[in-house]
Structure formats: structure tokens, C-alpha cells
Image (cartoon, rainbow, N blue to C red):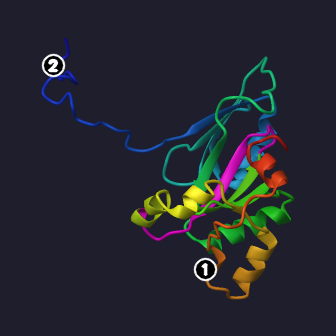
Amino acid sequence: MPANSADKGNGTRRVVPAKFAHAVLATKQFQAMVDWYTTVLQAEVVHSNGMLAFMTYDDEHHRIAIAAVPGLEDKPRHSVGLDHLAYTYANLSDLVYTYERLKRAGIMPVVTINHGPTTSMYYRDPDGNRVELQIDNFDSVEELKGFFQSDAMRKNPIGVNFNPDELARDFHAGVPESELKKYDATKGLDPETMRRLVGLNR
């Protein structure tokens, strides 16, 4: 038995991961996926051999890996499993800049929602996987956690859709961020937005 057994002296200690390290996506269209993630995340390819690519956008050795796996079958459009990956930007300016950069590249969000805690833009990669680009709407963890206990969350736990072009226009016009990120729980999602959010529509 190992000398440092987990149940010897500290069996009730809560041990959690230090961080979330990376995600690996298997694909039948290797280069298209690599190109998409390097464009969307402005990621650097640290290694690629034509079958496996490792990419990062920070000091982690890789945040995303793309693997070309022979014999893959397409995933059903509406099925169990991972729903999406999410990436948080430092501020609204970075999110607006990214939206406008991707729009120029022909990459558009499939749905945009102010969830309350976040202002979020959802995209689909070439394989149909969803990627959420977001900002936090509150300045502190306490405020973010508090929202989940609020009446606004109980009234509308999904969020309110918004027009990203209007958001960008108002941001450039100098509208205060507090106004642009404001959450109105009385507004709801239209049916088409909801269908896109849950993945029924591409």
C-alpha cells in the first residue's frame, strides 16, 4: 500500500483540479478545423503533423487539439454529450473587436444571448460543435453567484437575445458598458433563438 494513501490522515480533504487544461476534438476535416480554431481563438499551432494539431492562445502548452481519426461517423444533430466550449474575454471591447474581426472573415454567430451573468455569442465550427465567446457581466464573483439566487434568474434562467451589430454600434458610440450589459428579465427568447440555443437549428 502506498505510503501517502489518500485515506490516511486526510481522507476528508477536498482535492480539486488546479485548472481546466484542454479539449480534444476528433474530426474528418482536419485542416478546416485547425484553420477555424486558429482564426476564432487567434491560436498558435505549437505542433501539427497533418493528423494531430496542438494549439494554444496563452501560456498553456495546448488548449485545443484537433485529431483526424479514421472511420469517424457524423454525430447526430441533437444528441447527448458535450454541448459547447466557452471562452471568456477580458472586457466588452475585446468581445466586440472579436465579433467584428470574425464577421470580416465570414464567421458569424448562430445565436447571441445576454444570459444575465454573461453576454454571449455562440458560433459553430466546421463540424457543427458550438463555441461560446463571452464576457462576464459583473465585476465580482460574489455578484455573479448572487445573480443565480436572484428573482431575475428565477423568472428567466435562459436569457435575452440581442443584436450583435447594434451592440457593436452602441459600444463604439460610447454607450456605457453597464447599459450594454444590462439584463432585463422581463424579456425572453423568441422561439427561433431558443431552437438555435439548444442546437435544433444550425
User: The residue under label 1 is which amino acid type?
Assistant: Glu
Relative to 191, 172 lies left or right: left
In the rendered view of the protein, which quadrant contains the N terminus? top left
Report which residue position mark 1 lands on.
177
For image coordinates 77% across by 21% down, the residue present is 72
Mark 2 Cα-neighbour bin, 10 Å: few <14, some 14–19, many ≥20: few
Relative to 113, 107 lies left or right: right
- Specify the quadrant of the image occupied by residue 183: bottom right
SS assignment at label 1: helix
Pointer 2 with pointer 1, Cβ within 8 A:
no
Q: Position of residue 167 (x, y in %)?
A: 74, 74
Q: Position of residue 140 (x, y in %)?
A: 42, 67
Report which residue position mark 2 lands on.
3
Residue 194 seen anywhere in this rendered image of the structure: yes
For image coordinates 56% across by 58% down, the residue present is 153
Q: Which residues are magenta?
A: 125-141
Q: Earlier in the sequence, mark 2 or mark 1?
A: 2
Relative to 38, 202 lies left or right: right
SS assignment at label 2: loop
